[in-house]
Image (spheres, grey):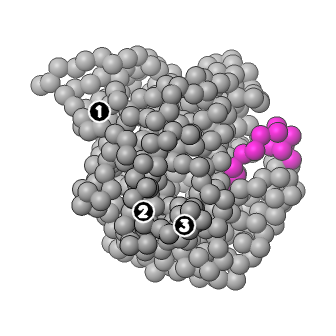
């Protein structure tokens, strides 16, 4: 058996009782694990990084922490029990989720919100307006993601979007399974007229066997129709596959091919390996999909046209939370990377965390909205000249045409590995930039809000 080498100490929670406990990151061969022990419930060990390409240590980048400008709670019990945000948090908000319903028109075997058909307790428009008002008084330009449940079960969804615009939120994204958007083109038009910027579309694969396993029924046709209806209205679409071991990991390349075939309406693909919170199949918690496995799968399944070396760690959140890469579709039909850097080697010098969040927020708002938005600066939001080295190979006859191509035919490929009760690392949690606005008007990191014990208990989600 390979020798364990301790990489560092952190804190986590017990998956059974959610008490805070010490934890260690250890490397065994080429793999990295989080290990911890609860005095009451014993030892736990979970894979957090599989393989040596890219190397775990090389993926790290340096950021100067910056406490949130607005803290709504005090530090009393310590992380993760004082979320609000509290002064111990080290990032401002980039994306803020507003959960406008607990209802849904599906009952997926996998659902972070554990949504169901019943929605009797949904907030009314007056309450939602009070949320926007409270957030606007904080003075921060959040990117708003309307979520649930399934937000499109609400007929007043256009009014909810209009309220957000009224209070000055210029980027509003819809988190949806796409069923109603695929079946009701008129509803899609109403959402566009209300001011919807982008659709975060649940899109788990390119064949119905995948949907039957993850969502319980064949859905590919309605998903495709949703993309087409959004394209007609100029609404940007981000495909969001939930990656499940043994189900759709071999479909990653085809998902990217589908995205390319739907450009420029499709603005990105955002992979999310399954996390064990909410409603999920009771698989062993060591059954994990980690960031390096996704990067290697992308390279293998695109026959090397997209390489693992084309992706970088994030400039805003913790490096081990996500990855991103940006690619332009040339007029000849090739995807060209925005950068020619080595995987894991960030182009950025150490930056203030607040600056990183601001750049991430701006990039998302410009890239994920529909085609025709202002030209993007570059892949990570900084001014590193080698970010666009390979773009010089693109054959265009004028600068304006080049800039238009970059603006409208850039595909952002990214992924985020959310944490659950088994994999939670409180160092990472304090760096979170994806937050949920709770019904009691607190701002709570997504992974803390959805944290679910093995018996189904939650710290925040009620």
Q: Indicate whether residue 308 is drawn in magenta.
A: no
Q: Nearer the viewer, mark 2 or mark 3?
A: 3
Q: Nearer the viewer, mark 3 or mark 1?
A: 3
Q: What residue lies at 53% left-to-right and 43% top-to-bottom? A: 380
Q: Residues within 10 Å of mark 3 (few under 14, many from 20)?
A: few
* The quadrant where residue 124 appears: bottom right
- Which element carries disc 1, helix, strand or loop? loop
**Would you name the residue on which mark 1 appears?**
55
Q: Nearer the viewer, residue 446 or 303?
A: 303
**Would you name the residue on which mark 3 appears?**
398
Q: What residue lies at 78% left-to-right and 53% top-to-bottom? A: 169
Q: Nearer the viewer, mark 1 or mark 2?
A: 2
Q: Is 293 above or below relative to 403?
A: above
Do residues under tags 2 and 3 come within 8 Å of each other at their CB atoms? no
Mark-to-mark CA distance, 2 and 3: 11 Å
Which one is earlier in the sequence, the residue at label 3 or at label 1?
1
Which quarter of the figure is the N terminus placed in? top left
Residue 83 placement (x, y as % from top left)? 66, 30
Q: Is residue 392 left or right of residue 139?
A: left
Q: What residue lies at 52% left-to-right and 51% top-to-bottom? A: 112
Highlighted range, magenta: 133-146
Q: Indicate whether residue 145 is drawn in magenta.
A: yes
Do residues under tags 1 and 2 come within 8 Å of each other at their CB atoms? no
């Amino acid at each position: 058996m390979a020798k364990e080498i301790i990489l560092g100490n952190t804190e986590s929670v017990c998956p059974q009782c959610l008490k805070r406990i010490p934890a260690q990151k250890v490397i065994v061969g080429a793999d990295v694990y989080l290990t911890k022990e609860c005095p009451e419930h014993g030892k736990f060990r979970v894979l957090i990084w599989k393989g040596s390409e890219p190397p775990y240590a090389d993926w790290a980048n340096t950021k100067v922490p910056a406490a949130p400008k607005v803290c709504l709670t005090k530090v009393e019990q310590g992380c993760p029990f004082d979320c609000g945000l509290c002064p111990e948090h080290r990032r401002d908000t980039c994306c803020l989720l507003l959960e406008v319903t607990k209802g849904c028109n599906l009952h997926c075997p996998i659902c972070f919100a554990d949504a169901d058909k019943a929605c009797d307790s949904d907030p009314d428009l007056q309450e939602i307006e009070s949320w926007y008002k409270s957030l606007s008084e904080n003075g921060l330009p959040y990117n708003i993601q309307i979520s649930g449940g399934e937000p499109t079960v609400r007929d007043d969804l256009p009014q909810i979007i209009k309220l957000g615009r009224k209070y000055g939120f210029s980027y509003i994204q819809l988190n949806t399974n796409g069923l109603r958007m695929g079946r009701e083109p008129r509803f899609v038009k109403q959402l566009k007229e209300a001011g919807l910027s982008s659709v975060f579309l649940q899109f788990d694969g390119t064949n119905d066997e995948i949907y039957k396993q993850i969502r319980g029924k064949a859905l590919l046709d309605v998903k495709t129709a949703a993309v087409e209806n959004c394209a007609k209205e100029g609404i940007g679409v981000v495909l969001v596959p939930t990656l499940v071991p043994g189900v759709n990991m071999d479909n990653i390349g085809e998902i990217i091919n589908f995205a390319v075939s739907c450009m420029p309406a499709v603005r990105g693909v955002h992979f999310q390996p399954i996390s064990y919170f909410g409603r999920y199949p009771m698989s062993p918690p060591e059954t994990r999909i980690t960031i390096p496995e996704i990067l290697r799968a992308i390279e293998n399944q695109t026959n090397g046209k997209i390489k693992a070396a084309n992706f970088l760690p994030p400039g805003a959140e913790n490096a081990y939370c996500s990855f991103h890469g940006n690619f332009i579709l040339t007029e000849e039909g090739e995807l060209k990377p925005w950068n020619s850097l080595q995987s894991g080697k960030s182009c950025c010098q150490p930056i203030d965390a607040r600056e990183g969040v601001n750049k991430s927020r701006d990039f998302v708002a410009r890239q994920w909205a529909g085609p025709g938005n202002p030209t993007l600066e570059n892949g990570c939001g900084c001014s590193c000249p080698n970010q666009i080295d390979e773009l010089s190979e693109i054959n265009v006859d004028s600068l304006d045409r080049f800039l238009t191509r970059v603006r409208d035919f850039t595909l952002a490929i990214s992924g985020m590995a959310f944490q659950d009760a088994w994999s939670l690392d409180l160092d990472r949690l304090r760096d979170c930039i994806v937050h949920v606005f709770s019904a009691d008007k607190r701002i709570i990191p997504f992974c803390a809000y959805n944290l679910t014990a093995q018996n189904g208990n939650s710290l925040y989600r009620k």
